[in-house]
Image: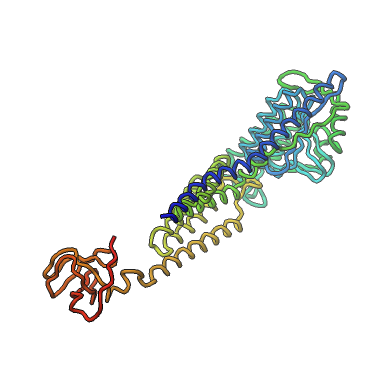
Amino acid sequence: MAIRKRASSVLFGLPQLLCLLCLLAVAPACAWAQAQSQAGLATVAGPAASRAGSSASVSLLTIDGPIGPAYADYVARGIARAARDQRALVILQIDTPGGLDTAMRTTIRAILAAPLPVACFVAPSGARAASAGTYILYACHIAAMAPGTNLGAATPVQIGPAGPDPPDAGNGNGKGKAPSAMEAKAVNDAAAYIRGLAQLRGRNADWAEKSVRQSLSLSAGDALAAGVIDLVARNAAHLLALADGRVVRVQNADWRVNAAGASVVDAAPDWRTRLLAVIANPSVALILLTVGMYGLLFEFMSPGAVLPGVMGAICLLLGLYGMQLLPINYSGLALICFGLACMVAEAFLPSFGVIGLGGVIAFVIGALLLMDSEAPGFGMPLGFVASLGITAALLVAVTAQVALRTRRRPASGVTAGLEGEIAEMLGDTAHEGWANVGGETWRVVTDTPLRGRQRVRVVGRSGRVLRVVPFDTDVGARAPPVNKL
């Protein structure tokens, strides 16, 4: 009883201990976030207070990687904060291979609705504004590139050219395979979208359309000569010097850019953007889903452990949140959930690996079908899926081996060696009745009439029936006491 009380007190204290650890882990993060916000307010207040002395400031937003929901949210919030802080200009420095169509359009909508000019700057040297980056560059009020950069290849990758010789959309005499009606519809939509952006900003609309239909690309110098961009600048300071005095249209009104000598406030991605970028990665989201399911499995197998269940639920919710940010194939997600459920069921059902193997197959197929886009940075690597599948198969194999070992293990305890055990009859019987054997109630048969509470000895067993004889007719000394419930 003391051991049980001690165990119950330990289990009762685990949730409190876990909550304390969570508070200790969250407290430094909250303090850091508060310090960051106070520092941001101090940085913002400085230029605003010195604006009376003709010292303007600009915000620098940075996109370095595939454009996803995290970066779209970052740009929208950055432009809103720059407008609230009365910045003279927003510089959007990008280096991206492309991204998701929905995230790109969200970013462009934020730029078009901005109450102040936004300058897109493809930098540093060696950077690129490919695919979705080209659309964003065309949407900005000022388009600039650093030497040694490039842009273009704006064909939507999921419906890209079918072969090395894509058909010429202009004359229809291409030698490649003709696109389907759905592909042609998507290409025409993308071409009209970027042409509209080019006409809005007064840039080369013909080349913009060709970058979609023919996947053309340009270097910084060629883009300037073709009228695709406005400036070629070495760095942000050089860009401000070249952009000073330019007149752009902001919300149907002329805006004169006064950026000479302006200070640059670096608004780098904060912890929220970085966290969203990690969670919205398809590979990370799939790992979170898998770890979450296994955490819940361990909690169900060992009730009271607490930590696997808590961590599993957190990982599962984070994985589902990341999935809803991505353009996923719901058939693939359903296969993944079905596969994980089968692997969990393998631990409770005596299938000896059959259900688990089917779950692994469903999981791998679902992971391959999960992403409904081939945008750069948002694919599901085959090697990664294979690694998860092999790991899941090993876990299923271990579970099946444990189940087989348990099945082959000889019976232990009261049911193993019953012959010779001393029992006590539970009632009078002439041939067949019930007896207490080692604390369990067994059906017994005898050739001698027996009385209730009479001691008997087990001499044989036939299935679930024991054969007994009176103990006093057997050779032996005083019978040991019988275990009772």
Q: Is residue 42 above or below residue 29?
A: above
Specify whether 181 is left or right of 72: left
Displayed quadrant of residue 456: bottom left
Report x, y in % for residue 440.
27, 64
Displayed quadrant of residue 425: bottom left
Q: Nearer the viewer, residue 169 or 158?
A: 158
Displayed quadrant of residue 89: top right
Q: Most extreme residue toward the bottom, as rendered?
A: 475
Report x, y in % for residue 195.
69, 32
Tell me, what colour scheme is on the image? rainbow
Q: Nearer the viewer, residue 292 or 413?
A: 413
Count of residue discs: 0
Report x, y in % for residue 342.
44, 55
Q: Is residue 358 above or below residue 87?
A: below
Report x, y in % for residue 41.
75, 28
User: Looking at the image, can residue 107 be seen?
Assistant: yes
Specify whether 316 is left or right of 42: left
Which image quarter holds the C terminus? bottom left
Q: Nearer the viewer, residue 366 or 178?
A: 366
User: Looking at the image, can residue 214 be seen?
Assistant: no
Specify whether 82 is left or right of 422: right
Which image quarter holds the N terminus? bottom left
Q: Residue at x 48, y 47 (%)?
A: 12
Q: Most extreme residue toward the front, as rendered?
A: 478
